[in-house]
Amino acid sequence: MIADYGNWRFYRVDDIDYDTKVTSKIEGTDYTYLEYYKEKYGKTISDKNQPLLVHFQKRKNALGELVIKIIHLVPELCKMTGLTDK
């Protein structure tokens, strides 16, 4: 998938989070996903009941340990790509 906002990054969808919606607060903030994307990118999300897509961003820290960050993506703001798993 490619995110249709910001810097147009590519993401692999690893899971679907049916418990988190765009009306949920972003972890560690007082913003909902609706508020965040409207304020930061000027994007209005119309489907307030859609589940979020999950991408597991895997990186190594300074000690060489694998750190996994969970990134939630709004399906309405993403586009499918023609890239394969390879």
Image (cartoon, rainbow, N blue to C red):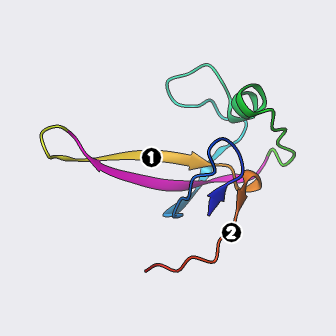
Residue at the (75%, 25%) spot, across then down: 39
Which of label 1 and label 2 is nearer to you? 2
Left or right side of 31 for 42: right
Looking at the figure, which quarter contains the C terminus? bottom left
In the rendered structure, which disc, 1 or 2, sits on the residue that comes first in sequence?
Answer: 1
Looking at the figure, which quarter contains the N terminus? bottom right
Q: Give the residues in magenta.
A: 49-61
Q: What residue type is labelled 2?
A: Met
Residue at the (73%, 36%) spot, across then down: 23
CB under 8 Å between discs 1 and 2: no
Residue 31 pos. (x, y %): 65, 23
Q: How far apart are marks 1 and 2 (CA)?
A: 20 Å
Residue toward you, 18 or 71: 71
Q: Is residue 72 located in the magenta-colored stretch of the structure?
A: no
Residue 70's label in the rendered image is 1
**Extreme residue toward the front, this view:** 7
Q: What residue type is labelled 1?
A: Ile
Query: Judging from the image, what secondary structure is the residue with disc 1 in?
Result: strand
**Extreme residue toward the top, this view:** 30
Query: What is the number of callouts on the image?
Result: 2
Where is mark 2, residue-wise? 80
Left or right side of 39 for 69: left
Left or right side of 12 for 1: right
Disc 1: CA contacts within 10 A as few (<14), some (14-19) or many (>=20): few
Q: Could you tell me what secondary structure mostly forms the magenta stretch?
A: strand
Q: In which quarter of the image is residue 18?
A: bottom right
Q: Is residue 50 located in the magenta-colored stretch of the structure?
A: yes
Residue 54 pos. (x, y %): 53, 55
Residue toward you, 2 or 57: 2
